[in-house]
Amino acid sequence: MPPPWYTTDMYGYYGYGDGIYLIALLVIMVLSLFAQGSVQRTFNRYARSSTRRGMSAEQVAGALLARSGSSVRIERVSGSLTDHFNPRTQTVGLSQSVYGSDSIAAVAVAAHEIGHVMQYEEGYGPIRFRNALLPVANIGSNAAPYIVILGLLFNSFNLAMLGVILFGAMLLFQVVTLPVEFNASSRALRMLEDGGYITYEESDDAKKVLRAAAMTYVLAACASLVNFLRLLSLASRTRRND
């Protein structure tokens, strides 16, 4: 997955001036790199602290799924912090650093993914809306900058605005992702506390792990907003030139 500040043609459409957008994006880029480092540092810090219950992340995830009556499977996946829920295959993938660990960090990450499982099984509104946006968001992420540039080259306001609208779908996708991620973390903490898998003190540490991860999504949305405003500014020039 590319970093949140990445765009398909960053250098291409920033050559038109208005450096304020580029400066804003560079600031977000630096903050994003810091946030990604913070996720790893926070995880590593609490990966050294075992929960008092002593259950591995895989065991906790399995127990949470069993309590909800879910048939979702758990599997080990390669990489670090590559944890995810795949609704198509009905599997929760736990990374090597999480799967067999009984640390506060690992248990928090695993429970977060179970939170996503619960969202899908309950038909949580924001995640359904986000999934509906996904096809258009993918197109907008890859093609929108080029469409806006073509609109500029051909002095076509309608073509440029098509690119802006497509990129707007990607921005909306990332904005909707925020409540999805925050809700999954909230569910995770509640399930862990209610089930007695972590103590009150451990819950505070688990919050820090999940909060650090959430910040990367916030910055991704901010970067997309800056790029959206820049594309909109470029598209408006074709109208002024009409």
Image (cartoon, grey):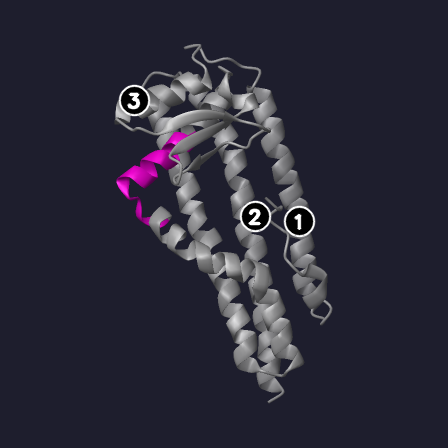
State the residue position of label 2: 219
Relative to 22, is 194 on the left or the right? left
Helix, strand or loop status at disc 2: helix
Q: Residue furthest bottom?
A: 242
Q: Amino acid at mark 3?
A: Ala
Q: Amino acid at mark 2?
A: Leu
Q: Which mark is residue 29?
A: 1
Q: CA distance from mark 3 to mark 1?
A: 41 Å
The location of residue 19, given as percent across then percent down, is: 71, 65
Report the predominant secondary structure element of the magenta stretch: helix
Relative to 57, is 2 on the left or the right? right
Residue 99 visible in the current orientation:
yes
Choose top left, top right, bottom left or bottom right for residue 194: top left
Q: Amino acid at mark 1?
A: Met
Q: Residue at x 62, y 33 (%)?
A: 38
Helix, strand or loop status at disc 1: helix
Q: Nearer the viewer, mark 3 or mark 1?
A: 3
Choose top left, top right, bottom left or bottom right for residue 193: top left
Q: Residue at x 56, y 71 (%)?
A: 232
Q: Which residues are magenta?
A: 112-126
Q: Nearer the viewer, mark 3 or mark 2?
A: 3
Q: Residue at x 65, y 63 (%)?
A: 21
Q: CA distance from mark 3 to mark 2?
A: 35 Å
Choose top left, top right, bottom left or bottom right for residue 33: top right
